[in-house]
Image: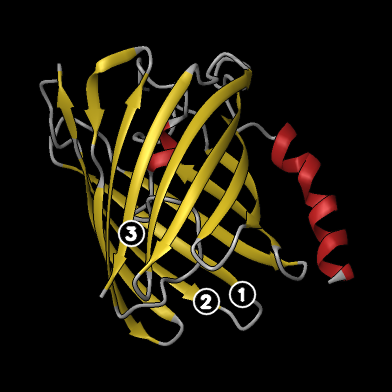
Amino acid sequence: MRRNLKVTLAFLPLAVLSAGPRPASGFNAIHESSYNLEPRGNFGAGTTLSIAGIIDSRATDIWQVPASLALKITPKMELGAGLKTIWGNEDDHVPFLVFGIKWMTRSQTSFQADLLVPANMNTGKGFSLASHHRFSYGSPFSARLAARLGFMEALVENDALMAFEVGFYPTLALGQALSLELGAIGSSQTKGFEENLAMDLQPALNVNFARESTLQAAVALGLAGDRKEEMRVKLTLIHGF
């Protein structure tokens, strides 16, 4: 427990200071580059369906509705695939398909790779690498640390080498079914760092039900940076079969 606390405190400044081409969204594109609709380790169920509804206060006539399916192929490895859809005042309703693979170590650290494939051939591809680690401090406190690097046209702007995002998510359990989470998310890229800098807070309420299912309601609020959020509401359903 003490070791986990020291490691977490060492990474917390990085998660805040490292901040974590969409005109209506403060989050950089790397934030939605995975089949995982929230940063986390491998799903517990053999098959997991995830779907979310996302709305930005600066574009209330546009809804993002990503959906994905994850399959556990071994106890430590899963495959995922999904759709990134946009509905409302948009011409391209399905801009990307995403395919990913994730591997979990014995230390509760997962490593992941995702490929974004454009449904419209005029759009570039995207590739991302991520790592996620869960810390346990003893009930009722825990935390998650997630880091992601993004490459290729879909995830970077102005020919930057790469984009990056770091998020730290401390969690307070209110019982077996309820928990409160406060995400500190920072993102930018190697070229045009200040123009793409986003530092945001994302409080969330998690409701667990059934065996491996969660309903999450989250609100992202901007702290600093040209790409920071104004207010972004996300409702996510994760259901394990």
Residue drawn 37% across and 50% down?
37
Give SS at disc 2: strand
Q: Amino acid at mark 3?
A: Ile
Q: Nearer the viewer, residue 160 or 185?
A: 185
Q: Mark 3 sits on what residue? A: 238
Q: Position of residue 14 (x, y in %)?
A: 75, 42
The label nearer to you, 2 versus 3, is 3
Q: Amino acid at mark 2?
A: Met
Inter-mark Cα distance, 2 to 1: 7 Å
The label nearer to you, 3 versus 1, is 3
Label disc, if present, on residue 13 of the rendered structure: none
Instruction: Judge whether 27 appears above or below 165 on screen.
Output: above
Instruction: Judge whether 65 appears above or below 130 on screen.
Output: above
Nearer the N terminus, badge 3 or badge 1?
A: 1
Q: Mark 1 sits on what residue? A: 108
Q: What is the crowding at mark 2: few (fewer than 14 residues within 10 Å), some, or many (at least 20)?
A: some
> For residue 233, which quarter of the picture?
top left
Tally of numbered discs: 3
> For residue 158, which quarter of the picture?
top left
Inter-mark Cα distance, 2 to 3: 19 Å
Q: Position of residue 59 (x, y in %)?
A: 30, 14
Q: Mark 2 sits on what residue? A: 104
Q: Amino acid at mark 1?
A: Gln
Q: Nearer the viewer, residue 135 or 132?
A: 135
Give SS at disc 3: strand
| Mark 2 in CB contact with mark 1 (< 8 angstroms) | yes
